[in-house]
Amino acid sequence: MTVEITVLISALTALAGMIMGINSARRASRKDVEKQSRETATIISEIGYVKAGIDDIKRRQEKQDERHYSLLARVSKIEASLPGHIM
């Protein structure tokens, strides 16, 4: 009878260990998914900041181009009005 109780206790202990192991693995998996989700969100956010910065640089470059073409037109006009201008 003591052998059967010992076998029963051993089987229950093994079963409890398996259940605890499975729960632990599930919990670790959930935490890994949460961590990866946070990292992905951070990366996406940083990419958004970089994109906004690039868009700002493009706008500034377009304004600079407009000023350059305006100045070029003014200088060309002045040069054309000078006496003895050769093209």
Image (cartoon, rainbow, N blue to C red):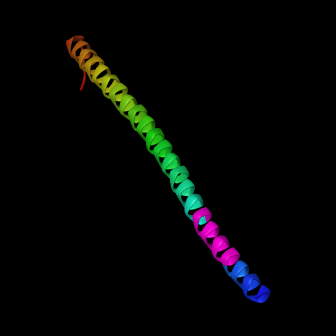
- Residue 14 painted magenta: yes
Chief SS of the magenta region: helix
Image coordinates for residue 8, horizontal then vertical, percent: 69, 82
Number of numbered tags placed on the structure image: 0
Question: Observer-nearest residue: 56 or 19?
Answer: 19
Image coordinates for residue 6, horizontal then vertical, percent: 76, 83
Q: Is residue 36 above or below residue 16?
A: above
Image coordinates for residue 45, horizontal then vertical, percent: 45, 39
Q: Give the residue furthest to the right.
A: 2
Q: Give the residue furthest to the front.
A: 1
Asked if residue 1 lies left or right of residue 20, the reply is: right
Q: Is residue 72 above or below residue 83?
A: below
The residue drawn where x is 26% and y is 16% is 79
Asked if residue 15 lies left or right of residue 69, the reply is: right
Q: Is residue 57 above or below residue 26?
A: above
The residue drawn where x is 59% and y is 69% is 22
Q: Which residues are the magenta region?
A: 12-24
Question: Observer-nearest residue: 4 or 15?
Answer: 4
Question: Observer-nearest residue: 55 or 25?
Answer: 25
> Looking at the rendering, which quadrant does residue 3 occupy?
bottom right
- Residue 44 painted magenta: no
What is the quadrant of the C terminus in the image?
Answer: top left
What is the quadrant of the N terminus in the image?
Answer: bottom right
The residue drawn where x is 66% and y is 76% is 12
> Looking at the rendering, which quadrant does residue 32 occupy?
bottom right
The residue drawn where x is 62% and y is 63% is 24
Asked if residue 87 lies left or right of residue 44, the reply is: left
